[in-house]
Amino acid sequence: MIADEEMVCECLKISAKEIRDSIARGNNSVEMITEDTEAGSACGKCKSYKSDPKMSRKYHIEEDFLERS
Ligand code: FES
């Protein structure tokens, strides 16, 4: 499990806990999580592997949070 304090969206400084809390509020797609938290609204690389082909971000909302939960 990714630690709560790990930074998922480096641009907007959104942590793993904030992503999980958003999912717990019923946001179950990357688009909804972005709208709720702003994670992914700058460079977009933290959204998914597809949006980050060079894997420059450590975590990705789609694969690390939505597909695992
Ligand atoms: S790392 Fe999330 S928008 Fe850039």
Image: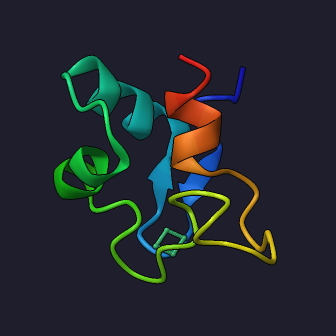
- Residue at 48% x, 83% y is 43
> Residue 38 occupies which quadrant of the picture?
bottom left
Residue 5 is at least partly visible in this image: no
- Residue at 67% x, 72% y is 52
Q: Residue furthest bottom?
A: 43
> Residue 19 occupies which quadrant of the picture?
top left
Residue 40 appears left or right of 47: left
> Residue 27 in the image: x percent, y percent?
23, 32
Quadrant of the snapshot with the N terminus: top right
> Residue 6 in the image: x percent, y percent?
65, 44
Question: How many numbered circles does the render carry?
Answer: 0
Vertically, is 53 above or below 46? Answer: below
> Residue 49 in the image: x percent, y percent?
67, 59
Residue 25 appears left or right of 60: left
- Residue at 49% x, 30% y is 66
Vertically, is 61 above or below 51? Answer: above
Vertically, is 19 above or below 67? Answer: below
Query: In front: 40, or 5?
Result: 40
Vertically, is 18 above or below 35? Answer: above
